[in-house]
Amino acid sequence: MRRVATVLFLFGFTISFPQVVLTADPPVSEATSECIGCHESVTPGIVADWRRSRHSRVTPVEALTAEPLSRRISAASVPGPLAGTVVGCAECHTANPGTHADTFEHNGHPVHIVVSPADCARCHPVERDQYAENMMSRAYGNLKHNALYQDLVGTVNGGQKFSGGLLAQQSHGDVTDAESCFYCHGTEIRVTGKHERNTSMGEMTFPTLSGWPNGGVGRVNPDNTPGSCTSCHTRHQFSIEMARKPYTCAECHKGPDVPAYPVYEVSKHGNIYSTLNKEWDWKAVPWTVGKDFSAPTCAACHASLIVSGEGTVIAGRSHRMNDRSPWRLFGLPYAHPHPISPDTTGIRNKAGLPLPTELTGEPVSASLIDAKEMETRRETMQKICRACHSTSWVNGQAARFEETVKSSNEMTLAATQILMSAWEKGVAKGPAQKDSPFNEPIEKMWVEQWLFYANSTRFASAMAGADYGAFANGRWYLSKNLREMLGLLESGPRAREAAPPLK
Amino acid sequence: MRRVATVLFLFGFTISFPQVVLTADPPVSEATSECIGCHESVTPGIVADWRRSRHSRVTPVEALTAEPLSRRISAASVPGPLAGTVVGCAECHTANPGTHADTFEHNGHPVHIVVSPADCARCHPVERDQYAENMMSRAYGNLKHNALYQDLVGTVNGGQKFSGGLLAQQSHGDVTDAESCFYCHGTEIRVTGKHERNTSMGEMTFPTLSGWPNGGVGRVNPDNTPGSCTSCHTRHQFSIEMARKPYTCAECHKGPDVPAYPVYEVSKHGNIYSTLNKEWDWKAVPWTVGKDFSAPTCAACHASLIVSGEGTVIAGRSHRMNDRSPWRLFGLPYAHPHPISPDTTGIRNKAGLPLPTELTGEPVSASLIDAKEMETRRETMQKICRACHSTSWVNGQAARFEETVKSSNEMTLAATQILMSAWEKGVAKGPAQKDSPFNEPIEKMWVEQWLFYANSTRFASAMAGADYGAFANGRWYLSKNLREMLGLLESGPRAREAAPPLK
Amino acid sequence: MRRVATVLFLFGFTISFPQVVLTADPPVSEATSECIGCHESVTPGIVADWRRSRHSRVTPVEALTAEPLSRRISAASVPGPLAGTVVGCAECHTANPGTHADTFEHNGHPVHIVVSPADCARCHPVERDQYAENMMSRAYGNLKHNALYQDLVGTVNGGQKFSGGLLAQQSHGDVTDAESCFYCHGTEIRVTGKHERNTSMGEMTFPTLSGWPNGGVGRVNPDNTPGSCTSCHTRHQFSIEMARKPYTCAECHKGPDVPAYPVYEVSKHGNIYSTLNKEWDWKAVPWTVGKDFSAPTCAACHASLIVSGEGTVIAGRSHRMNDRSPWRLFGLPYAHPHPISPDTTGIRNKAGLPLPTELTGEPVSASLIDAKEMETRRETMQKICRACHSTSWVNGQAARFEETVKSSNEMTLAATQILMSAWEKGVAKGPAQKDSPFNEPIEKMWVEQWLFYANSTRFASAMAGADYGAFANGRWYLSKNLREMLGLLESGPRAREAAPPLK
């Protein structure tokens, strides 16, 4: 980095954002000191993590002294007792007393296990509010309280018994769901009782939680708040570097259903990141294009506060992740404009299905953002692109992407028409026959068409990760799968269902 | 690295290649200063990239002072005006005036958008010439002007409409092709007109380009030159570290068709790279085995100038990437000796097909390198292997690889025979029935046999990435796919084609 | 790292393990100096590797001076001549004279090519002994000397000829096996003769080896010892950093059969590792949770000596890799308690098959560890978890995992029942029909059910890498594959076998 600094110096390219000066001896609250007294031995890993965190070294009052663009705290002021000490164990795990159902008496302190967005919001209210408008914060309910999606979950997670020449789908338990779909979507955490345990500090009583552990994005916390900040701001270092690097997003965006990470990896941006990121400044706030980083990560395009070397804001920080995206690439089953409300459980298409599009592709417009809002979001994103690319470049890329949204939706339509034909001809049994649309081979191929191949093709287009969108998981399979569905329609076997899959 | 230096010192292991001394105040041309004047604000990211580049700090005249093995410039001399300033915006984007169809008047300068190999060749002529002999530089035409391959492209990229119980393949547009196959192969960039745009600097006129943006290896530029240096030497840092690290190659060599990167990743070499590369010297020229790096990357084996610690040249730099490879692993449909000419559009097999092998596997010898040339290339590669491995080791590995070329070709032959039998029996329609050989399920399985599984098995063998070649994408599927093709031959459905796929 | 050190200092968090002081001028034996004299030129890469190694700088006598927990050598004392010089070429390649069949006279020294665990054991006897109890050390024989597994190997690696409308499986040679299954499992290395070669040092004679090269975990060496230390402690740097980083394990644990690495990658632990590992101390012995590393790698959970910041041992070092794992996740075909003996060739189920479970799932209890031993291993692992996680957290995770072992086994059972029904109905030919259970399409789907999808689901559960276990390679396919097997059972084609596959 010394060399880089020299180069910048040679060209007189310097700019500075007043940062917080760290005090040599940060004040730790008495309560937190008590926690550390035991937990240094009991759970040394997380205490060490916290010591490495900025929370262990800066008090909210100090954090408030930074210039606005450099500030990592969005509250205008912070309540007294919290303000003057660093943010330690007790500051979070005893916050907002009386609101957390998982609070228990722990060595004289009313401690709660699950720190919620409401706790973080005392210093970071803007981020909490934005995130509450982010569809991710509702990922639990949007999946759990949608009968159609629940049917899909059942066909994925439910066991299958073979008996009398037939397969009968078993019910799927919360325990399995919690480590499958809801690991990412978040679980609902409830206190189901309490239990005693003999610890190294003697007999102790703890609340018993269902849905625990979980750090999913749409977790429903014991204080009924939605979301979990630790999904991306991993406890207990709360490292901004982690939130900015793509591995955090990859935890849930790597599989064939939302393959953002594998697409990024083979894009030019991903290549630059992988090669050069060791020289970047991962902690600078704001984040300066070209100076702090040379290629965008997920965060740069979708969330971070980005400025130019001259200090101009290119994009404001946002925790409503789709602020810069006109299209929801994740087709259900077709790509569509983003839903207006983060809670999508109320959406119904004309056929009465809880889907944002018709089965024939038309968007459920009343529930989705309009063309003007799409244009606003597109422009917000493209302003970031143009920090490195000419307008011609950006427009050329955008034109390809719009074409791909269209053509991948058409490939989903063809698959849907084949499926409907299969239901009509009795090759498979669909909803009209009171059967799941997800449990027979041709139905599963249909799911793969939109969930895997159309999604992958669109992600590859959006981020120019062509290698993933051609043979790896995109267009090759979009075509092949259609042809195989047709083959099955013409002569394929039918896997009958012994037990009714819809409850 | 200090520790390493100490160790080397202890054993008296030092060697030095005189390098260029960087001047404190590099001379920037007036034209480039003007560019930066605006673009510092307009596209700050790429200006910052360039400032980090060697181009921003070294003049060609200085570059010429390095000892031959350390020289990063291959011209014997550089024309006057270019020689004495660093290589900035204007030096490339106004180079070779009168030859670039995309030149436009831009604030008083005749600027062209697409920098071509001819521009780079003023300082790097040897690399341009080698690359022009590299099949990669012809990747656009080799794919675009081969009717058979174009048929395959159509079945991958073309839309499909379901109508009357049949699927009809639609035409595939250039826009889709440009973000699929031609993202890597390169597009043909043509000026189709001009347009005005209101910019932050006022109303301006720009050329309108088709096929833009693109950085594919075989791009056809507006000056009609083939190839794009930026594919690997990414603009605008032009970092040799990027060209040497495997992520650059992985942009186009990760998918199941040419899985060089995933194979490398699970090889011992890839493991050493992933673990230790942070301590290597990525910028040293020449690149010294053991001192600068401990395991080869793609570049080390296929392109870079490699020397021993004593300064002996182990391999000369080459931009004709197959100089060290006897076999073309990428089967079309069988692995074969490398084509003699980088332009493969003229190759015809005995059946008249534009393929380097017969459908039954025999190579089209007249168009391919002979056994002697294969032996020369094998020896060039193995000399690199022997910098760390004994001859017995290298020969043992080579024997396995030769066996795999043979056995994977046999597995392609069996698949081809099943396909031919399917065509004969009317289970599918092939060229003799005036139908595409790529559009029906059994045909797509045949494509996967050679394009995915045989290729993957060979790549895994060549680089000893066994994990990828066994169950991940290699031998398991080579066998399974054959058995399933046979199943389909015996009783499988046939997906009929409504519209003629060959235009 | 300086910042971290400061933080630790602020909190008075320091702990020190007396380490060996490196001498400035390490004594190199005369024999090793002779080796280097030529090999510096002949194989410069590996000489440079060795110079970077700890072996080149520490004598065994010095190594013995470290405090017990910091010691990297497990012998109580080391024989005279070896003790006083660093561990160079001759120290290993001429060790244990008279026991290595591959010894040859080389410039006056009796050199053997393949360094074996017996050679390493002169300084590292505890590790050798533990590893000999590790099933991995028997990976060659456990695969090679099990007729059922050999049949599977044949159906994967054997060629297939299409003739008379049928596919006939060809024999698979050792050469192919060596770069497929046995690359990881290890080969048997035998001296088959000797050969002369003209080298840069003149005409020389070398032993001719079969099975060479190989660095597989269960390699059978020319001195008849099992295993190869270099699999993980890669020659010739023998870097503990490599053994601790996950890329080493990924060489053989990335494919869909044992997908430990891809699961780790999308877990929270893998995310923390990928983001922050550049700041960790990869060489510290012992390895301190929180101080040296912030999240476990494969080694941390399965092998390394782990201590708390206060110096308490959390887990002892073990080279018997399953010491901390109750379940063998790798189903054969069902997940089961770990085998008691590392040599599994003697295991027979009630049906007489060489499998650790019945085809209907019951474990072959007499050959497997009992519930008490499982509990011991579980507790050994969970003690590591609890260095960062509460007991509730750990128990919640464990409950999910136990459920997944059960449910994934049930999904294997359903697939097995469908297969048996297929054999009964004549849809496929199984052992009762004197045919391989692995060569027909429905049989291959059955293999994928347990080998790919059930294994993947369990690995994803064990390490909380949900993204891999849902759509990438787990539950989605567990269900889909079953439904497709049923489809094939009802109406599927049968791929007949021309030649008998069982030899």
Image (cartoon, coloured by chain):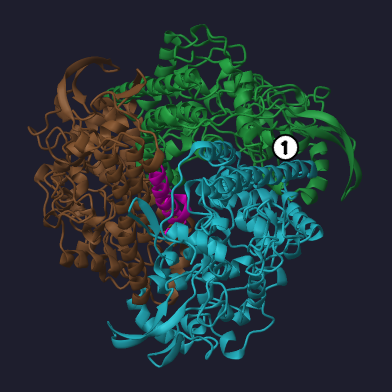
Chain colours: A green, B brown, C cyan
Along the viewing direction, whichever of C110 and A179 lies nearer the viewer: A179
Q: Is residue B480 left or right of residue B311?
A: right
A273 above or below A343? below
Magenta-drawn segment: B465-487
Magenta stretch: helix, strand or loop mostly: helix
Residue B94 visible in the snapshot: yes
> Which residue is under mark 1?
A213
User: Can you name the residue that lies furthest to the bottom here?
Assistant: C108
Picture residue at 59% right of the left edge, 85% below the top: C83
Along the viewing direction, whichever of C9 and C502 lies nearer the viewer: C502
Q: Is residue C60 magenta?
A: no
Q: Is residue B29 left or right of residue C117?
A: left
Kindly state the secondary structure of the residue where label 1 is placed: loop
Q: Is residue B470 magenta?
A: yes
Q: Is residue C448 left or right of residue B403?
A: right
10 Å neighbourhood of mark 1: few (<14), some, or many (≥20)?
A: many
Residue C349 in picture, x, y percent from top left: 69, 61
For residue C127, which quarter of the picture?
Answer: bottom right
Q: Is residue B143 left or right of residue A358?
A: left
Identity, as a three-letter code, of the amino acid under mark 1: Pro
Along the viewing direction, whichever of A283 and A139 lies nearer the viewer: A139
Residue A450 in picture, x, y percent from top left: 46, 26
